[in-house]
Image (spheres, rainbow, N blue to C red):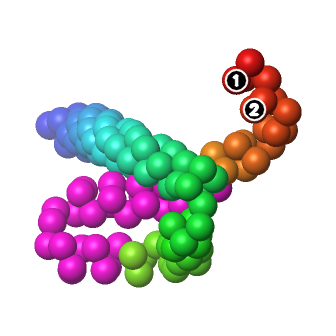
Amino acid sequence: MAENNLEVPWVKLVMDINNLFQTTVFIVSKGLATSIYLSTGSFFIGLGFGFVIAFFQTVVGGVVSKILDIVVRILRSVPPILILFMIFYGLKIDSYGVAIIRLGLISASYQSQIFRGIAGAVIARQFEACYL
């Protein structure tokens, strides 16, 4: 009878550790899936918008370039949590959509500067050479 009382806590401890491990694996896998979903969605939105913004800033120029420069500066200087609140309460869409849009806009503002720097690094003579 005394042995049964000693074995029960060990069985519960093993069951608790097993349950803890399963719960941890479940939570980490869900978090990993959510991170991949948000990262890929925002990356491709940022890539597309960033390329378009950089194209208009370098090729079109003029007033459009100045307006886009102001928009990029605002997106880079405003805290991301403020943009999150503005989109979430302004558009009334689900939280994943808001996160993808917010991260995509911030990514677009940074990627547009990367693409613009790449285009500015090409020497004018190299542009002439590609037309020949």
Q: Which mark is residue 12?
A: none
Residue at horizontal 76 percent and vertical 47 percent from the top: 120
User: Within the magenta stretch, is there residue 15?
Assistant: no
The image quadrant of residue 65 is bottom right
Q: Which residue is denoted by mark 2 in the rendering?
A: 127
Q: Nearer the viewer, residue 67 or 10?
A: 67
Question: Where does the C terminus fall, quadrant-wise?
Answer: top right
Q: CA distance from mark 2 to mark 1?
A: 7 Å
Q: Which residues are magenta?
A: 84-113
Q: Secondary structure at mark 2?
A: helix
Q: Amino acid at mark 2?
A: Phe
**Within 10 angstroms of label 2, few (less than 14), some, or many (20 or more) residues?**
few
Q: Position of residue 113 (x, y in %)?
A: 64, 55
Residue 125, placed above or below residue 100: above
**Within 10 angstroms of label 1, few (less than 14), some, or many (20 or more) residues?**
few
Q: Position of residue 129 (x, y in %)?
A: 79, 23
Magenta span: chief secondary structure? helix
Nearer mark to the viewer, of 2 and 1: 1
Q: Amino acid at mark 1?
A: Tyr
Answer with left or right where residue 52 lies relative to residue 29: right
Q: Which mark is residue 131?
A: 1
The image quadrant of residue 99 is bottom left
Question: Where does the N terminus fall, quadrant-wise?
Answer: top left
